[in-house]
Image (spheres, coloured by chain):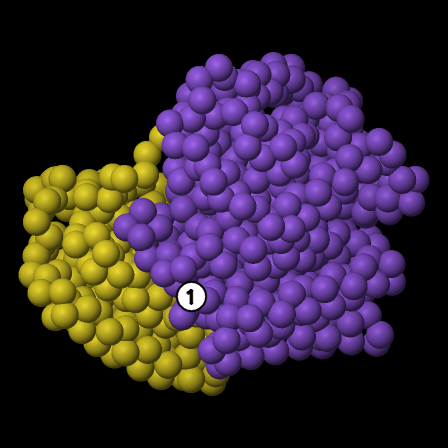
Amino acid sequence: MLIFHLDPLASSIFSFLVIVALILAFVMLGSHWIRNHVYAFAAESWVIAALSAAIGFYGHYPELFIIAALTALLRGTVLPILLLRIIRDLKLNREFTPLLQPSSSLLVGGLLVVFSYALAHKIGLRLDLVNSFAVLALTTMFGMKLIGFLMLVLRTEAVSSILGLLVIENGIFLGSQILVPGMPLLLEMVILFDLLIIVSTFGLLIRYLHREIGTTSSRDLTRLVG
Amino acid sequence: MMIFNALFAIWAVVGFAVIFCWLVPSARWAERVNLTAAIISFLLVVYLLWAAPVKGVTSVHDYLLLDGFGVWVLFCLAVVYLLASVYAIGYMRWMHDEAKRLHRFYSLFAAFALTMFLAPVQNNPGLYWIAIDLTTIVSAFLVGFQRAPQSIEAAWKYIVIVSAGLGLALLGTVLFYWGGTFVLGPVYAMTWANFAAITPKTDSVLLMLSFLLVLVGYGTKVGLAPMHTWLPDAHSEGPAPVSAMLSGALLNCAMLGIVRYLHALVGTDVAETAHTALVVLGTVSLLVAALFITRQTIIKRLAAYSSVEHMAVIALGFGFGGPLGIIGALYHMLNHSLAKSLVFFGAGNMMHAYGSKRIDAVRRVLDYYPKSGALWLAGAVAITGAPPFGLFLSELTVLRGGMAGQNAWAVWVMAVLLIVIFIGFLNHFRAMYFADRPPEHRPHLKLSAWHVAPLAVALLGVLALGLWWLPMIWQHLDAIAQHLGGPLHAAS
């Protein structure tokens, strides 16, 4: 398996890319300018594309090059353009009603990553993988997952909800590239296109929200309770 | 093979309805084509029920699986699709504002059915995940079809919460596959049978983590508390035929995923904990349903919380396990599909007749609508699990199944909560039917046969299932239960 025997150069490249992706998740968590979230998401997707390509190269999985290209195209380019169009059309600038200050949300995010590490370490111990790259991959996977959920909880703007979901997706995708690079190609491609459909659906619904309710903040969606 | 051709025929017919209804801007033709697709697919599913082997057979490079359990879920779906397609004809004609877009409604309606016809037969857990994801996308548009602020809000909350939940399910799926790479090597086919084959040799902590992620993920879609919050919104704000499909058909399709993963764990040392986890979620859901049903003020939210209740009963049945638990849960799926369609159809009729969504606006129903009102009342009695209807039998079977197992404590909780729900639910109907005060606005809407016939058919069905549990059905469910209760890898 790939994670057992890596040469030092490959290992450092992978670690570097994974950590950059995690830091970009924190960039999204710390900034309140929605446009910056989208840029950070695009950058993160390109980093994941690079990671896919690197794994394809070092692990001899040629089909990962296709995945890398599609990731860069769909996640790194098409999705951000769609999101930027929504932001432009609805004239959104920044998140108006954060529940926590940026510094506090960064702190909570940090704690979540520590928790992810504890979990990953535990699994690593059970599987005799403690010193391998798998622990870092698992930490990032769980960490990005939890940061995505944190964004869903803290942010109220509808576009931010989409971005939170996309960070969750990116985390899973990044983890699956490292842990199971041999996962069937068909599945990964379908998931990529699925993401595109989901985001278009979200885009459409946001426009309806804007037109019919006159708000895109989840704080104002209070008609249905109980 | 014949049976797969029948499956492809269903997809083709329903797929044709999707395209036809989208392209031809005639509501009348859309009604007919959609109804025809529903009838044909129903007949084909009945054939599958008879012809598909319980232990399952795969096709198309192992991508598709037809087994007893999957076909049973398809059958519940086909029943609801047929009933809802008939009812939609009468109901949707009330939507005068949407008359020009009505053909699009039928296109989406058929597309929703198509995505649900895809999900239960996927042999690849990843593709199953995608099929479930597609059902969410299509049904979100159906929930928001009326473009009223409430509908859009419900659709938005639905898609955000369910997508987040499904993210967890995907993570669980990836971790499950990863666990298998230590057994079967880095590249292997992702199938339910392979997942079952790896579980005895996978580390138990990793296995439990993956299962819990999958349980919470698909549990969100099933509407198990505390992940149920989208369900009352989506089920109450969509048009009534859509509510029936969401409740009677879609929830079963998502439950299927949980049960398949549970099945893959049979024979491992985490199986017991996994079953208990499902029982705990089921009990919490019952409690939440009981609380919200008792204090409910909106008609369709009442029915929606009743869906949470019945999914909890099904979850408890599968969680208890054993032949009786599983047979009860399977029988309950069909009973719930029929009875809940009836309740939602009746709710749709009365909401339009009285022009309000509120329970306290609907009064003295039998004075104005003797036929439709009586059917709806009978449906309410059926959905609370009173004899002589089918839900009584299936709930009793689940309770009996629970007595035999390790989680007997939950049986007592379940029995008490079911009684609370029975009283709370029917108390609202008492107010709507037998209160002294006449309604503020007298209803003067005429109900046609389209609005009443589907209720009568559903009631007859659930009554027949309650009066006589056909030995044929019992034996079929017993065979499925034996298959689901035993280890999968030994069978395949």
Total numbered labels: 1
Chain ID, purple in image: B
Q: Nearer the viewer, residue A29 or A122?
A: A29
Query: Which quarter of the figure has residue A177?
Result: bottom left
Q: Is residue B420 visible?
A: yes
Q: Position of residue A210 (x, y in %)?
A: 20, 59
From the viewer's side, name the closer residue of A181 and B306: B306
- Residue A171: give x, y in percent of width and height: 34, 59
Report if residue B181 is visible in the image: no
Q: Is residue B259 left or right of residue B465?
A: left
Residue under circle 1?
A: B99
Three-letter code, disc 1 = Ala
Q: Nearer the viewer, residue B302 or B357?
A: B357
Q: Nearer the viewer, residue B49 or B217?
A: B49
Determine whether B415 is above or below B21 in the image: above
- Work out whether A57 lies above or below B141: below
Q: Position of residue B431 (x, y in %)?
A: 50, 20
Q: Could you say where residue A128 lies in the image, as x and y percent from the top left? A: 50, 50
Question: Could you say whether the residue bearing mark 1 is in a helix, strand or loop?
Answer: helix
Q: Residue at x 70, y 53 (%)?
A: B79
Which quarter of the rendering shows the N terminus of chain B? Answer: bottom right
Splitting the image into 4 quarters, where does residue B29 fall? bottom right
The colour with which the image depicts chain A is yellow
Q: Residue at x 24, y 64 (%)?
A: A207
B373 vs A170, left or right, is right
Q: Which residue lies at the image location 61% right of the left edge and 78% below the top edge?
A: B16
**Quadrant of image for the C terminus of chain B:** bottom right
Q: Is B238 displayed left or right of B308 in the figure?
A: left
- Give the residue furthest to the right: B471
Callout 1 environment at 10 Å: few (<14), some (14 to 19), or many (20+)? some
Q: Is residue B182 left or right of residue B97?
A: right
Q: Residue at x 52, y 53 (%)?
A: B91
